[in-house]
Structure formats: structure tokens, C-alpha cells
Image (cartoon, rainbow, N blue to C red):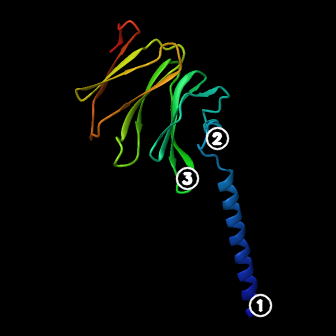
């Protein structure tokens, strides 16, 4: 009886060790957004984003968040990462637009001490919008963009429970393009 229990104990221990080894190997194979090369690998590993034509426009760290605007086949997009307990950036959100030279994204950040919302504007070299005027509950924020260049612009939004967002777009001569 004792010999049979020892065999069962050894089998259980071997199974536990194999599970731990498998878990550790899988954890080390996982891609994180810790640098530009690994960010590109993460983006390409996501279904619908596996294009070879991806250009990172900027890498922005905000506390324990990393937001990376990019162009995929010349279309604006962004990916968002959160830093895990081991200091690696794990992706938690990705978004892109199709057939646009200018795109706006509402980025949600974690943490009470942060402005928890930011407007992100991403452009490619076909962009003709030089200025954005964003109105949030009557408060107006302005930001300039580079014309005919890939660029990024940010607007920090005040903390609020809800909001109505409207923006106006202007060309480099100050003419209203879109309201």
C-alpha cells in the first residue's frame, strides 16, 4: 500500500513539474511591447493586423500605460499596452481606420491620478488637416498637426463622467474643412 502511494505521489509531482515547465516556456515565448521590434511583432500577431507594412509613428509612456500610434498599410491606428507586475508591456487594445489620412481615437487610461481620457490624432503623409479644434462640453482645445507628414497629436481631456465631443478641422490656410 505504501509503495502504491509513493508511485502516485511521484506521478503527481512529475505532472506538476511538467505543467510548471510548460507554463514557464509559454510565458517566455510571449511577445510584449517593451521595444519597437517587439511592438511590431505584437501588432503583426493580432488577427487582421498581420501586414508587413507597419510604421510606428510614436511610442508614448503614460505612467504604467504605453500608447503606440502607427500606420498599417498607410492607415492610422494605435495599440495600447499596460505594464504587468514583471515590468513587461502587455497589449490590451488595438484600433485602426481604413482609407483615411486623418483619424481620431479616444484613448482610455487606467488610474485615478491620470486624466483618464485623451484624444489621439494620427495622420499619414496624405493629410491636409493643419489644425484641430476639439470642443468638450463647451470647453475648447486646439492642436496643430503636420501637413503631408505622418504625425501624432494629443489632447488631454479633463476628468468627467460624460462628455459630448465635437471637433472642427482646418487646412493650413485656416479654412474650415469639416465640422
Which residue occupies the foreground of this view, 77 or 144?
Answer: 144
Residue 160: x %, y % from top left: 27, 40
Mark 2 touching mark 1, by CB under 8 A?
Answer: no
Report the quarter where the C terminus lies.
Answer: top left
As helix, strand or loop, the secondary structure at mark 2 comes to helix
Task: Work out whether 76 lies above or below 88.
Answer: above
Dot 1: few (<14), some (14–19), or many (≥20) neighbours within 10 Å? few
Does any portion of residue 1 appear in the rendered image?
no
Report the quarter where the N terminus lies.
Answer: bottom right
Does any portion of residue 100 appear in the rendered image?
yes
Distance Cα–Cα, label 3 vs label 1: 46 Å
Q: Nearer the viewer, mark 3 or mark 2?
A: 3
Q: In the rendering, which numbered label is found on residue 3?
A: 1
The residue under the point 60% across, 46% down is 32
Q: In which quarter of the image is residue 18?
A: bottom right
Residue 141: x %, y % from top left: 31, 25
Q: Which of marks 3 and 1 is in front?
A: 3
Distance Cα–Cα, label 2 vs label 1: 50 Å
Q: Residue tagged by mark 3?
A: 87
Amino acid at each position: 500500500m505504501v509503495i502504491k502511494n509513493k508511485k502516485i505521489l511521484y506521478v503527481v509531482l512529475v505532472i506538476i513539474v511538467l505543467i510548471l515547465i510548460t507554463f514557464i516556456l509559454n510565458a517566455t515565448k510571449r511577445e510584449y511591447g517593451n521595444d519597437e521590434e517587439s511592438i511590431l511583432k505584437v501588432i503583426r500577431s493580432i488577427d487582421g493586423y498581420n501586414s508587413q507594412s507597419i510604421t510606428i509613428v510614436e511610442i508614448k509612456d503614460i505612467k504604467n500605460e504605453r500608447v503606440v500610434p502607427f500606420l498599417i498599410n498607410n492607415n492610422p491606428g494605435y495599440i495600447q499596452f499596460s505594464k504587468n507586475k514583471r515590468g513587461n508591456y502587455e497589449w490590451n487594445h488595438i484600433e485602426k481606420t481604413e482609407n483615411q489620412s486623418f483619424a481620431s481615437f479616444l484613448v482610455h487610461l487606467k488610474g485615478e491620478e491620470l486624466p483618464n481620457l485623451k484624444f489621439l490624432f494620427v495622420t499619414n503623409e496624405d493629410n491636409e488637416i493643419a489644425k484641430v479644434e476639439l470642443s468638450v462640453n463647451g470647453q475648447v482645445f486646439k492642436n496643430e498637426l503636420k501637413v503631408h507628414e505622418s504625425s501624432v497629436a494629443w489632447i488631454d481631456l479633463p476628468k468627467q463622467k460624460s462628455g459630448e465631443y465635437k471637433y472642427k478641422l482646418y487646412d493650413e490656410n485656416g479654412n474650415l474643412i469639416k465640422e
